[in-house]
Each structure stands twice: as structure tokens, then as C-alpha cells.
Image (cartoon, rainbow, N blue to C red):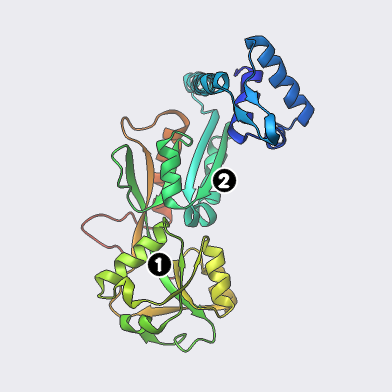
């Protein structure tokens, strides 16, 4: 339903790169150039400035882009509305997820959702929590699955699953078969996620609550992914905290061990977030309802008054 030339323009404007736009559209680069040239002829003005080896939007292009985005949105809404009248769900759905959820939980969620709603076309992106929430605020995505509640007034979040974080060490580490004290972490080479990571915030807050400040820790390396952390621990570079979902394979293979820490509770809520206002409808609403129901089969829903049982790794 979306005008094809406007779609090509919108995607080129997003990438500011004709080759990447061609890849996304499954077109040749000359075909993309031809569509942009035809649109520029139609409006009678250049939409991109290609001087100096760089592509930037002209004033006319910047003016047109919001309308192209609106047309895309209206087209998607129309498709969803017609599908809803017929008792089905169809069209596009864009989801963002923090890295832990995106890597270890979201694929299974999407696979099960599509078995129920095969005509929905899902695009998923995975970044750290702050980046995903920002994309949601900018309406680049319709829903976000993130670690912990959001602290923004323009975003509403609902907890759907409790997650337990664990300390992992190499299989041959001196702590591998022991329970340690929180104070023992002062001497550890601690590997951490980057600033903006929900996992990092949870760990720092829990340790501070247990009486161990950030100044007393010895962080030796920051990595921007959970897999990077686990690989670094396997290589003997230090110890780290990760979601229990992330380390299941390494525990089964015997390359890593989970260490218990006396008196330390490291848990967090996974939440589904969306723009403040009415609860989402259409495909986003269907996915939200699916997540809230599906999560009960994985872990008990946590409440403010209780910390329900957590299954073992």
C-alpha cells in the first residue's frame, strides 16, 4: 500500500547509503538510484546532496521525510485494521529488546507468536536497555522488552518475568566449589557490561545494598555483550555476573561454574514497555498479551510483595 518511491526514499534517508538501502530493499543499487531520481523529478527538487562523497538530505528531503514516515504508519495501521475486522492479525511489528532478552528469550517468543499469527511480519533489534528505550521513545519500535522498569514519563512498562543473575567463574577457579562472602569480591578481577546496560545497573545496586560500593570493586574490563563476558571468563580474564539464561550451555559443558554469594540477592524484572497512553492495540497489543501469558509458563510472575521460587539453572 505504501508508495514504492516514497518507501525507497525513506529507506535511503534512514541509511544515508544507497548500497545499504539496496540490500534492505532487495534491489540493485542502480534501481534504487533510478527510483530516487524519478521521485526528485516528480517533486522538481533534489532530495539528497551527493557532493563530497557523502549523502545528506537536502532541505526538501528533510521536509518530505516526516510525511513519508506518516504514510508508512498509516499504511501499516490500515493493513492491521482490515486484518482485525477479518478476525486475524497481519502486517508489520517492530520490537526492541535488551541484549540478554534479545539473545536468549526473544527468538523463542517470536517463534511461538508466529505460529499463532503467521501473517505478522516481525522486525527485532537488540541493543542495551538505554538504547532500546530511546528507540521506543522515538517511535522507531512499537514495543520493547527490557531489564527492569523504565524511569521515563513517556514510557510505560509492565513486569512480565523475574530473572536471577549469577556470578560465574572459570571451571578451575578457586571459588568454583565454594560459597563466598560479598567482601571477597573486592579482590576479584571483575568483568562488566558497558554503561547503559540494565545488567550492570542491577549488579551495582545489589552490591551497594549488600555494603560493597563501586569504589571497592576492581573492574578490569568492560564488554558490550553477554557473550563477550562469558568468553572472557572462559579465557581466565576474570569473573562476571550474567543472567542465568545466558550461562546454561556453559554450565552444561562444564566450562564455567556458578558461585553462590552468602546474603546477596541478585534478581531483576524483565518488563515489556510501550509509549505512555492507551494499551497498544493491533499487532503490538497481540504480542503484549502473548508475552504476559507466555511468561507464566517459564517463571512465576513476580509481585511487589513476594519473591517467588526461582528454578535452578
Circle number at residue 33: none
Look at the image and tell me in which quarter the N terminus lies. Answer: top right
How far, Cα to Cα, is label 2 from label 1? 25 Å
Task: Examine the rendering and report whether any part of residue 125 can be seen.
Answer: yes
How many other residues sit within 10 Å of disc 1, few (<14), some (14-19) or many (≥20)? some
Query: In the image, what residue occupies the spot 32% across and 40% down?
Result: 156
Q: Residue furthest left?
A: 305
Q: Residue furthest front?
A: 52
Judge from the rendering whether residue 204 lies leftward or rightward of residue 294; answer left or right: left
Residue that mark 2 sits on: 111
Choose top left, top right, bottom left or bottom right for residue 120. top right
Query: In the image, what residue occupies the spot 32% across and 50% down?
Result: 149
Q: Nearer the viewer, mark 2 or mark 1?
A: 1
Figure check: 170 above or below 129: below
| Residue 87 image point, x, y percent | 49, 24
Task: Examine the rendering and report whether any part of residue 76 can be seen.
Answer: no
Residue that mark 1 sits on: 165
| Residue 177 image point, x, y percent | 45, 87
Judge from the rendering whether residue 258 lies leftward or rightward of residue 60; answer left or right: left
| Residue 36 image point, x, y percent | 69, 21
Nearer to me, 310 or 72? 72
* Badge 1 element: strand
* Badge 2 element: helix
Marked residue nearer the N-terminal end (2 or 1): 2
Figure check: 142 above or below 248: above
Amino acid at each position: 500500500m505504501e508508495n514504492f518511491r516514497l518507501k525507497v526514499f525513506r529507506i535511503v534517508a534512514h541509511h544515508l547509503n544507497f548500497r545499504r538501502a539496496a540490500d534492505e530493499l532487495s534491489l540493485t543499487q542502480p534501481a534504487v538510484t533510478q527510483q530516487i531520481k524519478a521521485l526528485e523529478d516528480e517533486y522538481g527538487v533534489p532530495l539528497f546532496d551527493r557532493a563530497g562523497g557523502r549523502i545528506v538530505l537536502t532541505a526538501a528531503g528533510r521536509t518530505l521525510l516526516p510525511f513519508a514516515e506518516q504514510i508508512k504508519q498509516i499504511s501499516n495501521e490500515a493493513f492491521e485494521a482490515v486484518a482485525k475486522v477479518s478476525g486475524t492479525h497481519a502486517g508489520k511489528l517492530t520490537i526492541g529488546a535488551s541484549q540478554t532478552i534479545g539473545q536468549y528469550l526473544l527468538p523463542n517468543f517470536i517463534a511461538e507468536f508466529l505460529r499463532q499469527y503467521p501473517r505478522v511480519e516481525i522486525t527485532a533489534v537488540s541493543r542495551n536497555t538505554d538504547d532500546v528505550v530511546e528507540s521506543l521513545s522515538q517511535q522507531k519500535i512499537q514495543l520493547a522488552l527490557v531489564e527492569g522498569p523504565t524511569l521515563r514519563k513517556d514510557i510505560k512498562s509492565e513486569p512480565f518475568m523475574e530473572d536471577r543473575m549469577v556470578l560465574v567463574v572459570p571451571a578451575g577457579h578457586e571459588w568454583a566449589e565454594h560459597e563466598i562472602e560479598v567482601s571477597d569480591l573486592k579482590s576479584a578481577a571483575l568483568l562488566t557490561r558497558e554503561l547503559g546496560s540494565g545488567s550492570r545497573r542491577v549488579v551495582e545496586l545489589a552490591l551497594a545494598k549488600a555494603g560493597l560500593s563501586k569504589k571497592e570493586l576492581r573492574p578490569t574490563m568492560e564488554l558490550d555483550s553477554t557473550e563477550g563476558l562469558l568468553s572472557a571468563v572462559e579465557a581466565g580474564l576474570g569473573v562476571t555476573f550474567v543472567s542465568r539464561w545466558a550461562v546454561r550451555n556453559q554450565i552444561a559443558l562444564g566450562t564455567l561454574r556458578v558461585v553462590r554469594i552468602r546474603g546477596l540477592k541478585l534478581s531483576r524484572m524483565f518488563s515489556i514497555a510501550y509509549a505512555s497512553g492507551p494499551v497498544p492495540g493491533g499487532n503490538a497489543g497481540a504480542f503484549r498479551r502473548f508475552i504476559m501469558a507466555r511468561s507464566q509458563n517459564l517463571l512465576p510472575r513476580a509481585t511487589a510483595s513476594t519473591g517467588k521460587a526461582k528454578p535452578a539453572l
